[in-house]
């Protein structure tokens, strides 16, 4: 294994490097006189959750293209939506003698053993997008994540306004155990907690998948029918699946039921323009530039924040046309 200072820094981090206590700690300069290698290209592993929906595809392309642009060798593994496989993938990537692991953890708790595997092998981990149980600077090096609670809250505030304080909502949840589903659920419930007229009449997981959301929504429509006046989906894929289910049942999305999603996907922005969807909270999937900036700064021995939190925005009728070209 190559002896980049960052690798040693990661192994020794709890003891020597990360001495500050704030959540936005900076990586201090290595106290060790370890020679840096500059001649060989970096070799980085990327453990992806799955690669089916537009958000995931955009994220994979962003990481892949950015690595290629910088002459970094990328080894990619797609867990296909299985936490167990993702842990095996991490083992496999580490066997490929990587200098860093970029890890997008499928679940918050169940994915944490992957960190132990990386730590034992002395491979520094950059956690991206979803969070995993552990602490930056101790259990992994840096996290570049979304504020899922805030995303759910923005969706809830938007819906509360759109419903004028009264409505029956169906919540379609993402992958159980994922920080994305946990945060979005809690943020949404917090946002509507002061609106007693808004009731969540059903909440079921559709695993962030469009076809599954359509199936789940069709069965909810059978029992709740036209009592449903709103749908909050934890991502746009599920929002589009719900819209299809509403249409199949003879209900008009946007009129009979207002639909709000998260991601900022092109299909969602088109649905907003068509009046079938109310809003989407943008969760930017383009992680490549920031992730490799962080890795290269560490390689140069520069300071980086241990926690980088990305900002969300909202697309709705008023700005959908101007945002369509940024959507994926
Ligand atoms: O973790 C981010 C979520 O994962 C995205 O919202 C979703 O589309 C993806 O599967």
Image (cartoon, grey):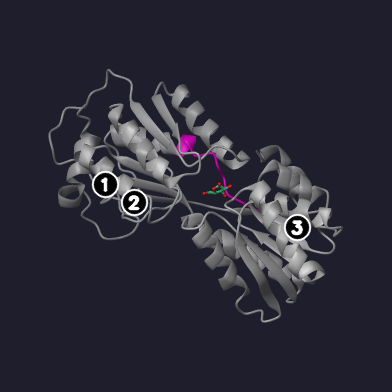
SS for dot 1: helix
Q: Quadrant of residue 159?
A: bottom right
Circle 3 or circle 2, nearest the eye: 2
Where does the image place residue 32, in percent across and percent down from the top left? 13, 38
Q: In which quadrant of the rendered image does the C terminus lie?
A: top right
The label on residue 112 is 2
The local crowd at label 1, few if under 14, some if 14 to 19, many if 20 or more residues have their Cα within 10 Å, is few
Q: Residue at x 60, y 77 (%)?
A: 193
Mark 3 sits on what residue? 278
Q: In screen coordinates, is 53 left or right of 143?
A: right
- Front-lying residue, 318 or 59: 59
C-beta proximity under 8 Å, tags 2 and 1? yes
Whichever of labels 1 and 3 marks the residue nearer the N terminus, that label is 1
The local crowd at label 3, few if under 14, some if 14 to 19, many if 20 or more residues have their Cα within 10 Å, is many
Q: Is residue 218 above or below residue 267?
A: below
The local crowd at label 2, few if under 14, some if 14 to 19, many if 20 or more residues have their Cα within 10 Å, is some
Residue 285 forms part of the magenta stretch: yes
Where does the image place residue 117, in percent across and percent down from the top left? 27, 42
Residue furthest to the bottom: 196
Where does the image place residue 261, in percent across and percent down from the top left? 66, 55
Q: Is mark 3 within 8 Å of ligand 1?
A: no
Q: Quadrant of residue 324?
A: top right
Mark 1 sits on what residue? 116
Circle 1 or circle 3, nearest the eye: 1
SS for dot 3: loop
Q: Is residue 173 visible from the viewing direction of this image?
A: yes
Span of residues in magenta: 280-290
């Amino acid at each position: 294994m190559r002896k980049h200072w960052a690798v040693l820094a990661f192994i020794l981090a709890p003891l020597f490097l990360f001495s500050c206590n704030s959540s936005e700690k900076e990586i201090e300069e290595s106290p060790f006189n370890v020679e840096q290698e500059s001649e060989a290209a970096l070799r980085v592993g990327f453990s992806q959750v799955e690669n089916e929906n537009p958000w995931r595809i955009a994220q994979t392309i962003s990481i892949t293209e950015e690595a290629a642009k910088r002459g970094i060798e990328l080894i990619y593994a797609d867990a296909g939506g299985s936490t167990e496989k993702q842990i095996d993938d991490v083992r496999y990537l580490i066997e490929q003698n990587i200098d860093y692991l970029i890890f997008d953890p499928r679940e918050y708790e169940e994915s944490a053993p992957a960190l132990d595997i990386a730590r034992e092998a002395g491979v520094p981990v950059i956690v991206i997008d979803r969070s995993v149980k552990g602490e930056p600077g101790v259990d992994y090096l840096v996290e570049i994540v979304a504020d899922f609670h805030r995303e759910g809250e923005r969706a809830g505030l938007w819906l509360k306004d759109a419903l004028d304080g009264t409505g029956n909502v169906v919540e379609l949840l993402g992958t159980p155990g994922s920080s994305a589903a946990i945060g979005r659920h809690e943020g949404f419930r917090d946002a509507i907690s002061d609106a007693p007229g808004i009731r969540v009449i059903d909440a079921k997981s559709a695993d962030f998948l469009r076809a599954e959301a359509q199936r789940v929504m069709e069965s909810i429509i059978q029992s709740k029918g036209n009592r449903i006046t709103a749908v909050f989906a934890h991502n746009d894929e599920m929002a589009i699946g719900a819209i299809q289910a509403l249409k199949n049942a003879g209900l008009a999305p946007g009129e009979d039921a207002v639909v709000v999603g998260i991601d900022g996907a092109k299909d969602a922005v088109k649905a907003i323009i068509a009046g079938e969807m109310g809003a989407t909270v943008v969760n930017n999937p383009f992680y490549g530039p920031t992730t490799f900036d962080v890795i290269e700064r560490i390689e140069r021995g520069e300071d980086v924040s241990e926690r980088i939190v990305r900002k969300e925005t909202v697309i709705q009728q008023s700005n959908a046309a101007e945002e369509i070209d940024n959507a994926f």
